[in-house]
Amino acid sequence: MSKRYTSLLYLCFLLFAILFIFLSAHSRLATDDYYFIADSQKHGLLEQVGFQYMNWTGRYTATLAMSIFYNLWGLDQLPYTALPLISILLLFLGAFLLTDKLSLQFSLQLELKERFIITCCFVMLLFFLSYDIGESWFWYCGYSSYLWSIIALIWGTYFLLHKQKQVLRGTLATFCFIYIGAASELYAVIIGLIYTLFIIRIIRSKNTNLSLPHKWKLYSTYTFFGIAFLAMLLAPGNYLRDQLFPEHSFFGSLVITTKSLIKLFLVFLPSKLPYLLALGVPLLLIGMKIGKRKAAIGSFRSSAKKTSIFTAIILLLFFWLTAFVMMETGPARVLFFVSFIISIYIGSLFFLLGYYQVLQSKLLAILKIASVLLLFTMLLTHLYQESKTSSNYSYKNDQRIALIRSLNQKIQKDTIICLPLLPPSGMLYSAEISNDTSHFTNKELKMGYDLKFHVVVNR
């Protein structure tokens, strides 16, 4: 890649960083955040985790992680705006370090600059391929079960692949996989299945070059992961929450799974084609450079076929499990795992296209220019739109919070206060409530601020 092209890429990465920082600064507490803040004020930290475990959900690691910052910060908005930034920095650093280990594992010999570009493209793909950016990246309540599970998976895999300081790395990997095993049932099942297949492959392989300490690190981490998962499944709260879902149906779940896959491939992914092209081409160019540096073994068709089949099986299983448990496609925060798998798949596919020198040089030249200009234009457009939309949303939301706090000091009797509608939240998660006082969003806002009155919006 030329210096001019690389400089343009770095400028795009900088624009994305500015966009994310801006969105983080304007993110706000919303809906379930208020419920857990109120619950943290009612119960102590460990008592809150125990209460949720017995009465609502077995996700004790996710509940604990979430409860820590709710107990520390309460209703103070400012520190929460750092959570998205901390999360994406952990994601980026973990992916960057893991890229280095995978580079060594597959003898790709990636340079520092190439690893940086791959990591940036992956993080941006994951961001823009999210089913709902606001719900996945800027809703604090959703982090602990979903985004942080992905971050723990990336770091845990890095620690497992690290061959030095086995005891320390094994301990850190164990903590990561314990977190994953008890943070989300669906994520833990799929990750556990992949881990199981990996363990079986190691046991059956006669030519593995893994040392005995490295093997024991893999086995012990897997064991603790399984124990954490079983402890989550046995939680009494799971059975109470399961009663709120419709009756499970095998054939009904197959229908929902089919609809989910159709929506993914015919609606969702086609709408994301500009992002796939803009962020895939840099990976293609890196793959092409690596392919020229070393003799490529195999063929694009064979490698792409294996990658596609594995991805398809994971997606099919995830969609079916979600449909069977919830009898619906699942909310956007749950489907973040789909975005994660698709991001890895798209990145791998573009890399293989370059690695096996599939495309002609004339087409590559066009794609190279078109992709970076497209990425630059899209990021500038997002920055312009969000500079108006998100900032206006956060300003109006702050006005609303100041109003209800002021009224809560004056009003002494039970009444209904009608609040103005919040403006569109753009890429952020909206804290809007309903015109029905019994709606959960209204109740949670009332709980969070311990209001003496009910609140509604005038729709």
Image (cartoon, helix red, strand yellow):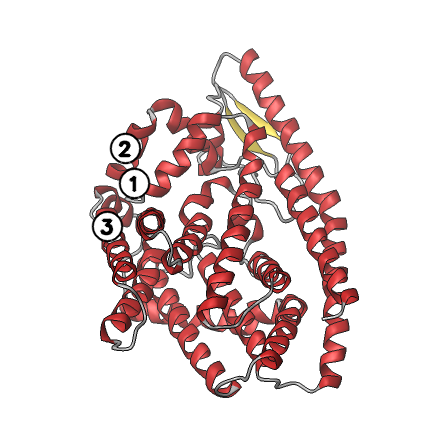
Vertical order, 233 against 295 (above or below) = above
Q: How crowded is mark 2: few (under 14 residues within 10 Å), some or many (20 or more)?
A: some
Of 298 and 247, which appears nearest the observer?
Answer: 298
Q: Which corner quadrant of the image does residue 26 belong to?
A: top right
Q: Are marks 1 and 3 in contact (CB under 8 Å)?
A: no
Q: How crowded is mark 3: few (under 14 residues within 10 Å), some or many (20 or more)?
A: some
Q: Where is residue 216 in the image (x, y as percent from the top left)?
A: 24, 58
Q: Position of residue 47 (x, y in %)?
A: 28, 28
Q: Position of residue 389 (x, y in %)?
A: 71, 44
Helix, strand or loop for disc 1: loop
Instruction: Name the residue located 69 percent from the left edge and 87 percent from the top edge.
Output: 360
Furthest toward the right, the residue is 4
**Can residue 228 be seen?**
yes
Judge left or right: residue 287 versus residue 395. Answer: left
Reading the chain from its start, which is encountered first: label 1 or label 2? 2
Of 216 and 423, which appears nearest the observer?
Answer: 216
Q: Say what amino acid the circle numbered 1 marks.
A: Trp
Question: Which label is found at residue 51?
Answer: 2
Disc 3 designates what residue? 233
Disc 1 designates what residue? 56
Judge left or right: residue 380 versus residue 51. Answer: right
Of the 4 image quadrants, the one containing the C terminus is: top right
Question: Which callout, 1 or 3, points to the residue nearer the camera?
Answer: 3
Vertical order, 49 against 270 (above or below) = above
Reading the chain from its start, which is encountered first: label 3 or label 2? 2
Q: Say what amino acid the circle numbered 2 marks.
A: Phe
Q: Do the residues labelled 1 and 2 touch (CB within 8 Å)?
A: yes
